[in-house]
Amino acid sequence: MKDYKEFKSRRDRLAFLLDDSVAIIVNSKESIRNKDCHYPFRSDSNFHYLSGFPEPDTIVMIFGGKNPKSIIFCQPKDEIKEIWNGYVYGPKQASKEFLFDEGYPLADAQKLIPKFIKSKKIFLLPSSRVGHIFSPKWFEINNKLREDLSEILDGMRVVKNDFEVNLMRKSADIAANAHIQAMKLTAPDKYEYEIEGEILNQFFRLGSRNPAYSSIVASGINGCTLHYIENDSQMKDGDLLLIDAGCEVGSYASDITRTFPVNGKFSSAQKEIYQLVLSAQKAAIEKVKVGLFFDDPHKEALKIIIDGLIDLGILIGSRDEVYEKELYKKFFMHRTSHWLGLDVHDVGKYLSKSKNSQAVKFTEGNVLTIEPGCYIRPSDHVSKEFWGIGVRIEDDVLVTSAGHDVLSKNAPKEIKELEEVIGTSNA
Ligand code: GLY
Ligand code: MN
Ligand code: MN
């Protein structure tokens, strides 16, 4: 029951922000895998945020103004369907249990929704699947009534309350534990997918049925492909293994990357690059604080990585030259952070519209990743000992009143800690 109150309070807040308008949010459809088999269903994140209701093909309307209310349109009770596929709430039970003011069968949506709207302004999400409710002609006539809901909703979602932080903590704890088990099982000659299997096993065993994204288990040169998900190479003695894996708890994502040697011992070249990325990551985390800007951690990480790569002779030139000509992008080509929440790359503004596109400032309750990296592909200009080294270290960080809290801190990242744990399940 408690959770439903949380979802209702979000609807109440949105209703307040809507003034005299109405918002319509449509859930995702099930995706067919083939014939009558479906991909696992996951609700649209905005729909989940405002309802917690788990069935596809459902519509929620939220009315602002003097008499705020929220209503749900969902599948009717259907005994035959329930025998095959399990429980269906039906409009009556859905509205009662999920604390909506009214509930109607989905089949009535087309007839009732335009009537309910009257001449109110309508807030929709850009991705809204409303073609089956309103005809293109209806939109033509009522076009001026339509507004973008994402502006308001993204602003709500980018600040997490205690309920959400609690779920994100659990998600990060489970993922951190999965990373530790993966480290323990890693050894030369095993295949990357064996480690992926262990990660998924840990997610499931610890109560998360959904990875937040396809896990990256990338050994050797595969670690230099940012979104490598084949995970089918045999791991070699002397290679690094980069694992980027996170899960969902209550639909909230964790997103953790760790990199460590397959044989349990960093070579001196691997150590140089690893220590550099780790120093950059730690310094970037220190830049997460209320009032600092979203791009401060990236600037800090970039400065340290540029200086380090110049010292190692991997980049040639002065810091300013490397920065201005963006020479560093050959080795560090992505940003350091993104918002994290119901989506792994969560909603929320990065730039402030009102202030000449300056980066936004951190607010208490923001959650973001800090994930600098360094990826060195074979190249004539780089000493051979560094070839094939791909390192990323990624943590999930909550902005608190006192500074920050690293939600994923249980996943080891110091060289000594890693060397102590790698391969210990193979002993
Ligand atoms: N796992 C996706 C990312 O790190 O952004
Ligand atoms: Mn990430
Ligand atoms: Mn990641």
Image (spheres, rainbow, N blue to C red):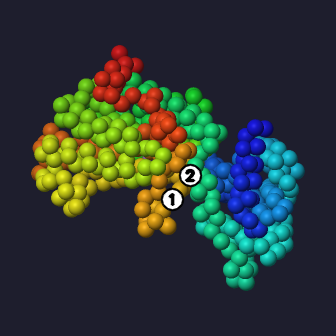
Q: Is residue 408 above or below residue 54?
A: above
Q: Is residue 116 above or below residue 106?
A: below
In terms of secondary structure, where does tag 1 sit?
A: loop
Q: Amino acid at mark 1?
A: Lys
Q: Residue at x 86, y 47 (%)?
A: 96
Q: Amino acid at mark 2?
A: Val
At which x and y percent is residue 391? 30, 41
At which x and y percent is residue 417? 34, 23
The answer for how far apart the CA atoms under marks 1 and 2 are is: 8 Å
**Marks 1 and 2: CB-CB under 8 Å?**
yes
Quadrant that contains the N terminus: top right
Q: Residue at x 15, y 39 (%)?
A: 385
Quadrant that contains the C terminus: top left
Crowding near the residue tagged with mark 2, few <14, some 14–19, many ≥20 C-alpha atoms within 10 Å? many
Q: Which mark is residue 158?
A: 2
**Which residue in the rendered view is the most extreme toward the right?**
92
Label 1, on which residue? Answer: 349
Q: Is residue 240 above or below residue 148?
A: above
Disc nearer the start of the sequence (1/2): 2
Q: Is residue 235 left or right of residue 150?
A: left
Say if disc 1 is inside 8 Å of ligand 2. Answer: no
